[in-house]
Image (spheres, helix red, strand yellow):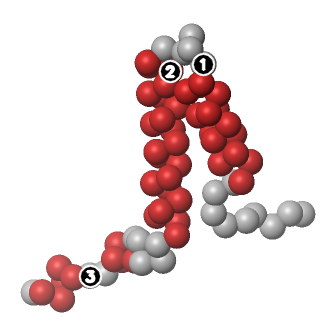
Amino acid sequence: MRKKQAGINPALEEAISKLLAEVMADPAASMVDKTRVIDRALKLEAIRLKADDAAWGSGFMNDDEEEAN
């Protein structure tokens, strides 16, 4: 059984990168098509930044409200 790797699937990153390049170079692609691909690439980048930030989400389990009372 394969161990699940942490982080973003490299094949997914490569596919989005390739799609971005192809759509942007396609003169027949509509502005909507280009915007959707850019949006997907930006979402992937946001996920990558969150995954790389070890402190992201660490405050969700803090009981700051209980400590303040």
Name the one closer to the observer, 23 or 40: 23
Relative height, residue 7 to residue 29 (above, below): below
Q: Quadrant of the N terminus?
A: bottom right
Residue that carries the numbered disc 2 in the rendered image: 33
For residue 58, the mark is: none
Q: Nearer the viewer, residue 56 or 11?
A: 11
Q: Nearer the viewer, mark 2 or mark 3?
A: 2
Which residue is rendered at x = 57% and y = 10% of the image? 28
Q: Which residue is mark 1?
A: 26
Residue 64 locus on image (x, y percent)? 21, 82
Q: Residues within 10 Å of mark 2 (few under 14, many from 20)?
A: some
The amino acid sitting under disc 1 is Asp
2 and 3 marks in contact (CB < 8 Å)? no
Instruction: Describe the element under mark 1 as helix, strand or loop.
Output: loop
Q: CA distance from mark 2 to mark 3?
A: 44 Å
Identify the residue at image location x=73%, y=65%. Answer: 5
Give the amino acid at mark 3: Asp
Amino acid residing under circle 2: Asp
Q: Mark 2 or mark 3, which has the lower sequence index?
A: 2
Dot 2 falls on a residue whose secondary structure is helix
- Name the residue beneath numbered marker 3: 63
